[in-house]
């Protein structure tokens, strides 16, 4: 979406604009100019060489990665520039008997230039990221015409996913009706909705999830523990959102078409992990995100979500 | 060497009449002498450094080898001698709490603040010596209380050093120890900061204008202002948390506001990041200038950028909460202020480079550590831009990328700053020189193993590997996304073990040199600031008489004198004085 050559070129030009005045000034000050061109060429290729960013499966993932690599390019460039000058100075100006250091207290013009150049790059980054953030976290979810809806429940230490069922509505729930294994969410009619410990979603359809943090209910004492913070994190989506007790949040994502490859046979798994410390078993709090073809999804949740038109 | 200050002669001033020789306990234990209190902070901090380091190694051991027995300390853990998942949560919580509140803040602010401020501004002691002693004694008390958590039912605090409710409200009793301990540490910090601010404003020697103060003093001045306005907010949040835990209130739990705690916590704890780095920046600026034999580049920009950091430091706390459920529109606001705060840090880095340019650089142990500070702070500062960018933060928040970043700032930055400062002032503190060879071996070993330990964290963090996980391969998650990164984790643990081993040299060097080091002259580094005109170590009361200050602290390689340094208190002959005044007017 946002990742195209024009932007890459704009980035390189901006980096050059930063580098040229700096190199000229150091040339004026009697120092050899740093080879800015080589560093600029290195930065983007070095960025692309890091193999560890996981595969993207969401529509907005590419714009997150674009920003990541843009910042990586700029910071790598700055790091190389600073380290090159640093090493040059440390070697060239190492102590020699009888030599005297320059008696210089500063250079106002140089200081103004590097301050404003840095400010310009930082401001550029401010504007560059605004749209992506708004797209991911501030989207008006009412604009989606026929979204796929799921309720996501988190408790110490597991995930529950609830699908609205053929009637498209979520059942009311009460913690007193919770029976682990039979009715883990305490639904009034556990058969009316589809419950699963796996998040099953279709490709290329906006998915809206409501995130709810649950306490643990103990039937014997009739009391429930306090719900705590969790965080819904799926690295391939490039998405993360904390779950705040008593303050449910709605999030959205859309799986990129083509995520299901021919060898996947209509189903592919990714890992959902809790990213906010939620207790001693925090690290065990994982679940699967399953991307399914239409047929497999129908079989998985037991009804056709398109005709059900789920709503919160 | 030339000094104009006279040697102490007793009975010269009124203050001297009040001063009577205290006994052994009065001199070394319940001392009110700022120098002794500074050294007390140093030793307490070093003891906690050992503890915090061992906790860190246990954390690393668990990540690399979850099912193997911990060597030497396995008996202290469960029956099998391995670190269990729940012990792991205690370990990383206590590691961070100990390192932040009992190592870095006490050494940077407590040691350098106490030891350096009066010596640098030409004062006999702190404005409130008794308050100063009290501020120190709060710290070991707080340390005992936080460690007492290990022995209460349920074990020590395990809710992370951030201790977010509601988890911290339902956590074990150790959490209450943690809260009380932090309230005491905070009180200690507040008492210290009041003292520093008053001393710096009221007790400077004649001629010591604000713009003739060293950057160490400037940095601690600004840090103290941050402490004074930030810490009470944390203290109140901790009191509310204790009430939620024990008095049945619901400020942060039940239908209360869990996010309110996060706001209060980060309103202190973000400035606290600057509390942990600004004094190191000041110390390093001084060390760089001394050993580059060159005036600091852009003195005023250096001082004012710290003022800028402290001002902006109060309006960036929300960047810790981008994914917390806070209104995302606020995310944009905090993103802008966070981008802006990168600016003064960049200015400081360029100025350090400018200081090195054209110098005559001596590679002493303090200088090597100061150079490491600059280069590691560049990495730590630049990696901060990733998480300032809100969309990138969605991916890397709560992953090892953050852990890598914070360690580049707090170890690569603050701790190398501590090493530089301790090596620099050691001769003045103990009257002995540190062993240079040992110091250099310690430096090189630490520098290499530090980078091997923490740099890979950025790579596994970019892969999304979450922090605070006791294991990455578990039965529940069938995909186990991060299990293939285990070789990285093992490499980092090997490096961390080596990093820990190299710190033995630091302790050997310090304790061996205190007793058997070479005797230190008054001014071993040929430095300009006032403490180097005094004997090593200076007597109680420091200056007899109070010196007159004629210039700033960074006049190295001045053309006015034959030597390459010009002490702040040296009076020049009238002709040179006239020349100096002219140079000053020209902006030198």
Image (cartoon, coloured by chain):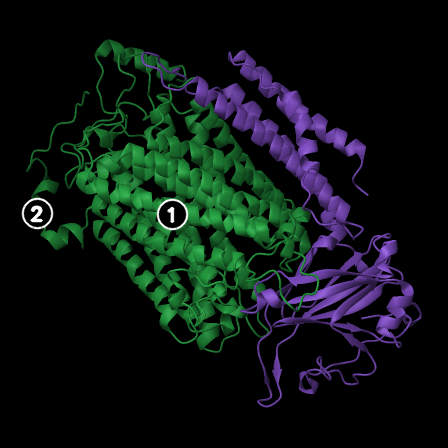
Chain colours: A purple, B green
Residue B461: x, y in percent?
Answer: 61, 49
Question: Would residue B324 be found to the left or right of residue B217 on screen?
Answer: right
Measuring from the top left, give residue B448's x and y in whole percent. Answer: 46, 38
Tell me which corner region of the image, top left, top right, bottom left or bottom right, holds residue B119.
top left
The residue under label 2 is B21
Q: Which residue is mark 1?
A: B501
Q: Determine the residue positioned at 63% across, 58% down.
A: B326
Q: What element does badge 1 sit on?
A: helix
Mark yes or no: residue A123 visible: no
Report whether residue B436 is seen. yes
Q: Residue at x 52, y 62 (%)?
A: B66
Find the residue positioned furthest to the left.
Answer: B11
Is B427 drawn above or below residue A229 in the view shown? Answer: above
Instruction: Work out which residue is located at the far bottom of the displayed protein and give it.
Output: A220
Residue B223 image offset from top left, x and y in percent: 40, 44
- A50 relative to A209 in the view: left or right: left
Q: Report the side of B466 relative to B536 (left or right).
A: right
Q: Quadrant of residue B182?
A: bottom left
The structure residue drawn at horizontal position 76% and vertical position 81%, both measured from the top left corner, is: A172
Q: Is residue A310 above or below residue A130?
A: below
Camera-nearest residue between A221 and B94: B94
- Count of number-bearing discs: 2
């Amino acid at each position: 979406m946002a990742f195209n050559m024009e932007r890459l070129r704009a980035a390189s030009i901006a980096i050059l604009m930063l580098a040229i005045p700096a190199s000229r000034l150091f040339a004026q000050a009697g120092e050899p100019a740093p080879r800015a061109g080589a560093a600029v060429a290195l930065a983007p290729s070095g960025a692309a060489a890091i193999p560890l960013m996981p595969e993207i499966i969401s529509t907005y993932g590419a714009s997150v990665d674009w920003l990541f690599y843009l910042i990586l390019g700029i910071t790598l460039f700055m790091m190389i520039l600073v380290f090159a000058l640093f090493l040059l100075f440390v070697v060239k100006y190492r102590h020699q008997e009888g030599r005297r250091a320059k008696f210089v207290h500063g250079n106002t013009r140089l200081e103004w230039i590097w301050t404003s150049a840095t400010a310009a790059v930082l401001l550029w980054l401010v504007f560059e990221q605004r749209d992506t953030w708004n797209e991911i976290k501030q989207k008006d979810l009412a604009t989606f015409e026929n979204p796929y809806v799921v309720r996501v429940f988190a408790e110490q230490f597991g995930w529950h996913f609830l699908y609205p069922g053929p009637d498209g509505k979520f059942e009311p729930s009460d913690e007193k009706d919770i029976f682990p294994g039979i009715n883990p969410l305490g639904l009034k009619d556990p058969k009316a909705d589809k419950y699963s410990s796996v998040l099953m979603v279709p490709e290329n359809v906006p998915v809206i999830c409501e995130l709810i943090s649950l306490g643990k209910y103990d039937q014997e004492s009739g009391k429930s523990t306090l719900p705590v913070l969790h965080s819904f994190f799926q690295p391939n989506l490039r998405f993360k959102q904390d779950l705040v007790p008593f303050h449910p949040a709605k999030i959205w994502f859309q799986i990129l078409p083509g995520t299901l490859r021919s060898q996947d046979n209509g189903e592919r798994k990714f890992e959902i992990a809790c990213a906010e410390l939620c207790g001693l078993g925090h690290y065990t709090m994982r679940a699967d995100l399953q991307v399914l073809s239409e047929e497999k999804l129908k079989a998985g949740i037991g009804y056709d979500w398109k005709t059900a038109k789920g709503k919160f | 060497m030339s000094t104009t200050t006279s040697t102490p002669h007793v009975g010269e001033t009124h203050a001297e009449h009040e001063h009577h020789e205290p006994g052994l306990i009065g001199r070394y234990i319940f001392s009110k002498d700022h120098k002794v209190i500074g050294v007390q902070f140093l030793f307490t901090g070093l003891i906690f450094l050992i503890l915090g380091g061992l906790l860190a190694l246990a954390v690393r051991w668990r990540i690399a080898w979850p099912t193997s027995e911990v060597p030497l300390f396995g008996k202290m853990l469960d029956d099998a001698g391995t670190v269990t998942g729940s012990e792991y949560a205690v370990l990383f919580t206590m590691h961070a709490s100990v390192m932040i509140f009992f190592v870095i803040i006490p050494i940077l602010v407590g040691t350098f603040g106490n030891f350096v401020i009066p010596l640098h501004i030409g004062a006999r002691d702190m404005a409130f010596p008794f308050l100063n002693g009290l501020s120190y004694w709060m710290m070991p008390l707080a340390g005992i209380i936080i460690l007492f958590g290990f022995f209460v039912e349920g074990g020590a605090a395990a809710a992370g050093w951030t201790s977010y409710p509601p988890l911290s409200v339902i956590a074990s009793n150790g959490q209450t120890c943690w809260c009380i301990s932090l309230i005491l540490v905070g009180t200690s910090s507040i008492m210290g900061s009041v003292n520093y601010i008053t001393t710096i404003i009221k007790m400077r020697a004649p001629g010591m204008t604000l713009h003739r103060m060293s950057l160490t003093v400037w940095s601690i001045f600004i840090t103290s202002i941050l402490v004074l306005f930030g810490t009470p907010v944390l203290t109140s949040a901790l009191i509310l948390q204790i009430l939620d835990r024990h008095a049945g209130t619901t400020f942060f739990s039940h239908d209360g506001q869990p996010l309110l705690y996060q706001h209060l916590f980060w309103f202190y704890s973000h400035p606290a990041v600057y509390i942990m780095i600004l004094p190191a920046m000041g110390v390093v600026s001084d060390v760089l200038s001394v050993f580059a034999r060159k005036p600091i580049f852009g003195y005023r920009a250096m001082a004012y950028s710290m003022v800028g950091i402290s001002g902006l430091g109060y309006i960036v706390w929300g960047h810790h909460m981008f994914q917390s459920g806070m209104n995302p529109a606020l995310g944009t606001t905090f993103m802008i202020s966070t981008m802006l705060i990168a600016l003064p840090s960049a200015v400081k880095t360029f100025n350090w480079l400018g200081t090195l340019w054209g110098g005559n650089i001596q590679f002493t142990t303090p200088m090597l550590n100061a150079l490491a500070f600059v280069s590691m702070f560049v990495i730590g500062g630049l990696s901060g831009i990733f998480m300032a960018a809100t969309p990138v933060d969605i991916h890397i928040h709560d992953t090892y990328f953050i852990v890598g970043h914070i360690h580049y700032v707090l170890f690569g930055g603050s701790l190398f700053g501590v090493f530089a400062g301790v090596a620099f002032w050691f001769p003045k503190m103990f009257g002995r020189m540190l062993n240079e060879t040992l110091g250099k071996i310690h430096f090189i070993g630490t520098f290499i193993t530090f980078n091997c330990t923490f740099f890979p964290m950025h790579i596994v963090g970019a892969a999304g590997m979450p922090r605070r996980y006791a294991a990455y391969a578990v039965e529940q998650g069938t995909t186990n996304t991060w299990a293939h990164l285990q070789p990285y984790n093992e490499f980092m643990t090997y490096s961390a073990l080596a990093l820990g081993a190299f710190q033995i040299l630091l302790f050997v060097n310090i304790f061996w040199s205190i007793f058997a080091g070479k005797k230190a002259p008054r001014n071993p580094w040929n430095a300009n600031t006032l403490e180097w005109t005094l004997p090593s170590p200076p007597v109680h009361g420091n200056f007899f008489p109070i010196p007159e200050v004629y210039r700033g602290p960074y006049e190295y390689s001045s053309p006015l004198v034959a030597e390459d340094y010009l002490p702040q208190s040296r009076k020049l002959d009238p002709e040179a004085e006239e020349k100096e005044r002219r140079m000053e007017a020209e902006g030198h």
